[in-house]
Image (spheres, rainbow, N blue to C red):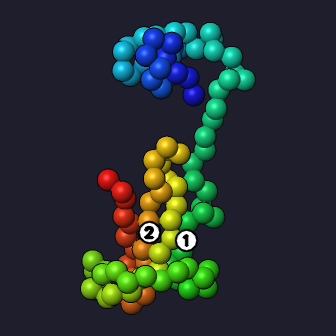
Amino acid sequence: MEFCDECGSMMKTEGDNWVCGSCGYEKARDAVSEASMTTTQKQEKSEIVDVSDAEDKGLAKTNTICPKCENDEAYWYMQQIRSADESETRFFICTECEHKWREDDH
């Protein structure tokens, strides 16, 4: 991850350059050492909760209305799926029809 020298915003790579999305400042990628870069990876499949084993994993239950069958109880868990500076996302699994949905804090 690289931050803009001019405004401090996060920069993105475009070709051989780092480009600031806010002010347009550019600098060559080779000007940044590899040691200062951070690489992230996609979510692993083992982190995804399967509906059929929600109860086996000991997920907590809560009173909420399923948007599909209107059942009033669901398993729930929270997971960080966006950047670390944003809140976690709540996932629900209906105890009746096993419909999955999520709730963000937007």
Q: Nearer the viewer, mark 2 or mark 1?
A: 2
User: Residue type at mark 1?
Assistant: Val
The image shows residue 33 at horizontal and vertical percentages of 68, 17
Residue 72 occupies which quadrant of the picture?
A: bottom left
Q: Can residue 12 be seen in the rendering of this structure?
A: no
Find numbered disc 2 in the image and state the secondary structure of the residue it sits on: strand
Residue 18 vertical position relative to residue 80 in the rendered view, above or below: above
Residue 42 vertical position relative to residue 73 in the rendered view, above or below: above
Q: Which residue, given by chain and number where applicable, does mark 1 sit on?
A: 49
Badge 1, how many Cα within 10 Å: few under 14, some, many 20+?
Answer: some
Q: In the image, 87: left or right of 104?
A: right
Residue 31 vertical position relative to residue 71 in the rendered view, above or below: above
Tag 2–tag 1 contact (CB < 8 Å): yes
Residue beneath the point at 57% across and 48% down:
42
Badge 2, how many Cα within 10 Å: few under 14, some, many 20+?
Answer: some
Indicate the quadrant containing the N terminus: top left, top right, bottom left or bottom right: top right
Nearer to me, 91 or 60: 60
Q: Which residue, given by chain and number where applicable, does mark 2 sit on?
A: 91
Nearer to me, 93 or 46: 93
Residue 34 occupies which quadrant of the picture?
A: top right
Q: Can residue 74 be seen in the rendering of this structure?
A: yes
The image shows residue 93 at horizontal and vertical percentages of 43, 78
Give the distance between the C-alpha atoms of the residues marked 2 and 1, in whole angstroms: 10 Å
Residue beneath the point at 49% across and 53% down:
81
